[in-house]
Every structure is written in C-alpha cells, then in structure tokens.
Image (tube, grey):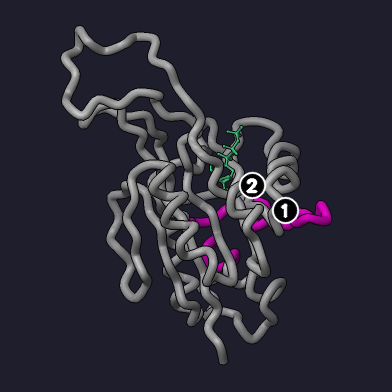
Amino acid sequence: MKKIRCLVSAGPTREYFDPVRYISNPSSGKMGYAIAETARDAGWDVTLVSGPCFLKVPKDVRFVSVTSAQDMLEACKKYFIESDILIMSAAVSDVRPAEKSSRKLKKSEIDLNPRLERTPDILLTLSKEKKKQILVGFAAETENVREYALKKLEQKNLDCIVANCVSGEKSAFASDENDIDMIMRSGEIIDFKPASKIILASRIIEFLSVRFFGANAKPKSKI
Ligand code: CTP
C-alpha cells in the first residue's frame, strides 16, 4: 500500500533584528513533534519542518530545521508539492523587524520603536497552491476559540482546524497537556477532551486517517 506522505510543521519561528535578539513566542513544538512521531508510527512518510525547539529530533522522519517564517515557508513549499497532507502546528511569528543588523547592536543603538512588517502566511500561501493535499491548521486563541478558529479555516481554505486555547493556566503553549476541538469545513465540531499531547496526537492522526484516507491507515492507538 502506498504510504501517506505527511508534512508537519512545529515550534515557533524566530525573527531576528540582530544576531542575538529576536521576536518569537513560547511554543515548545511538543504538539507537532508528537504528531510527527505518531504519524511515523502509523506507517506514514513524515517530513517535520521545525522552528527552534529543545526537543529530541524524532527518528525515521525527514527533519528540516528552520529559523524564520520565511525559512519555514520555503521549506514547506518544497515538500508540500509531494505531500498528501499538511499539518501546520507551528506557531509562526506574524511579524518581523523590517530591518536586521548583521552585527550585535549596542543597546544605545536599538530603535525603541522599531518598524515591523508582516511575515508571509504560510498556510494561506500553500492553500493557493493546493492540488489534492489535505490542509490541517491549528488555531491559537485566547478568546472565542471556536468562532475564531472556524473563521481561520474559511479564510485559509482548510479541510479542518485544531482549535486550542493559549491563555491562562490551561494554555497549550509549552504545556504537556492540551484541550482541543477539531473543526471541520461543514462546521462539525469534535471535542477531543483534555489529554496529554501524546494521546491527542494519536487521536488526531487516527481521526485524520479515518476521515481522509480510509480506516486502513489507522495507527496503533495509544488511547
Ligand atoms: N500560520 C501560518 N503563517 C503565519 C501565521 C500562521 O501558516 N504567518 C498558520 C499557523 O501555523 C496555524 C494557522 O495559520 O496553523 C493559524 O495560526 P494562528 O497563529 O492561530 O492565527 P493567525 O493566522 O496568525 O491569525 P491571528 O494571529 O490574527 O489569530
């Protein structure tokens, strides 16, 4: 049977304005790495494009290390063409400094009101290049989680989106646990119930297998 080719993005991106200073976010990459490992264990052919994370590189996956949103876009573009599914769990920085110094700035030189520019929206860009690929997004929200997630699904022309909350004590950022809903194009919402990211990764891959590739592709369940 032909292997399912899966492209997963994970972790934060870093947008440097000099060699030692950057804009980023607290994403650990745990969810994306767990998804990549679970997909590999399910027999999928996995490419993991990762921003800077402090996690062990998973075995038997193609691993591509990137730093900025622009790097991540280029890497994802390269492997997207030959993928059956993209799972975009990376927390891509939305902005970057408009100017970047090649040497460390003295603190007296740092512009306290730096000009920022938007980074490319990777999912949106790839959704315009989509042929038969299934597109799965992640929505990081602090309020109106389901409503905003559904909006993103529509705006970025996704097949489904994982909605998670990133505020307060239960923030998904850097935690080992998560509480997610899967939202489909039809508006159907599947509550995955709070669990560890390892277990949720298993539920996500099992769900995607059944919905998009037929039950034969189901992984060994860790639930
Ligand atoms: N994403 C992306 N490129 C960006 C920003 C986000 O590909 N420059 C992807 C994320 O990987 C995620 C989805 O888009 O799968 C939603 O990301 P999120 O940060 O929740 O939302 P944004 O689109 O950035 O919108 P906002 O910050 O306004 O909530």
Q: Read off the magenta span.
A: 181-204
Q: Give the residue type that dot 1 points to.
A: Ile
The image's mark for residue 163 is: 2
For ligand 1, which image quadrant applies? top right
What is the quadrant of the N terminus in the image? Answer: bottom right
Q: Residues within 10 Å of mark 1 (few under 14, many from 20)?
A: many
Q: Is residue 115 left or right of residue 163?
A: left
Q: Please determine whether, in this image, residue 180 is positioned above or below residue 5.
A: above
**Residue 174 can be seen in this image:** no
The image's mark for residue 183 is: 1
Residue at image position (72%, 53%) is 183
Residues at discs 2 and 1 in contact (Cβ within 8 Å): yes
Residue at image position (39%, 10%) is 113
- Circle 2: element type: strand
Q: Please determine whether, in this image, residue 155 is positioned above or below residue 129.
A: above
Q: For marks 2 and 1, give the CA distance.
A: 7 Å
Q: Position of residue 115 (x, y in %)?
A: 42, 17
- Circle 1: element type: strand
Q: Earlier in the sequence, mark 2 or mark 1?
A: 2
Residue at image position (71%, 51%) is 157
What is the quadrant of the C terminus in the image? Answer: bottom right
Q: Please determine whether, in this image, residue 11 is positioned above or below residue 26.
A: below
Is residue 193 on the magenta stretch?
yes
Q: Is residue 184 left or right of residue 62?
A: right
Task: Examine the image and state in which quarter residue 88 appears.
Answer: bottom right
Q: Residues within 10 Å of mark 2 (few under 14, many from 20)?
A: many
Is residue 194 on the magenta stretch?
yes
Residue at image position (51%, 52%) is 89
**Viewer-nearest residue: 218 or 126:** 126
Q: Position of residue 76 (x, y in %)?
A: 47, 57
Q: Position of residue 144 (x, y in %)?
A: 71, 33
Q: Residue furthest bottom?
A: 1
